[in-house]
Amino acid sequence: MQTAPNMQLIEVEYPHIAKSLKLLWGYPEANKYIVKLIDDCRTGQRQGFSPEILNALLDIQEAHQKLVKDDYQPSTWGDGREFFR
């Protein structure tokens, strides 16, 4: 996994998310999992991720999409990076 620094950041803050990403790595479900993490499907009940964690997730998502092509559709909100850079 070439996303080691990003994964380490996630492991510190969200070990359960890092564990799931490692288990799903290499499978199309990983892309769907990341989209589900980023999208607020709880009608505003989520606190949201810090900019560092969000960018790490987006970098991991980008790396995984290059590795595994699937029917991934971008998040409803787009990439989101423009808000944090």
Image: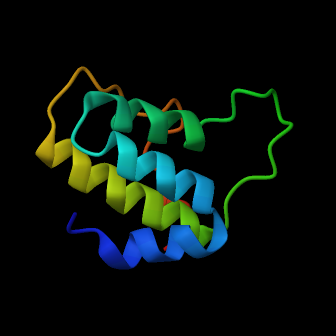
Query: In the orientation shown, which residue stands out farthest toward the top?
Result: 71
- Please, which colouring scheme is shown? rainbow
Query: In the orientation shown, which residue stands out farthest toward the right?
Result: 45
| Residue drawn at x 51%, y 76% as measured from the top left | 9
Q: Where residue 51 sits: x, y (%)?
A: 60, 69
Q: Is residue 24 above or below residue 59?
A: above
- In which quarter of the view is residue 73 placed? top left
Q: Is residue 8 above or below residue 46?
A: below
Q: Where residue 11 sits: x, y (%)?
A: 54, 69
Q: Tell me if I can see residue 80 in this picture.
A: no
Q: Nearer the viewer, residue 53 or 79?
A: 53
- Left or right of 38? Residue 68 is left
Q: Where residue 59 sits: x, y (%)?
A: 34, 61
Q: Is residue 25 above or below residue 28?
A: below
Q: Nearer the viewer, residue 28 or 81?
A: 28
Q: Where residue 31 sits: x, y (%)?
A: 35, 36
| Residue drawn at x 45%, y 57% as measured from the top left | 57
| Residue drawn at x 48%, y 74% as measured from the top left | 85
- Left or right of 27? Residue 76 is right
- In which quarter of the view is residue 37 placed? top right
- Left or right of 53? Residue 82 is left
Quarter of the rendering occupied by the N terminus: bottom left
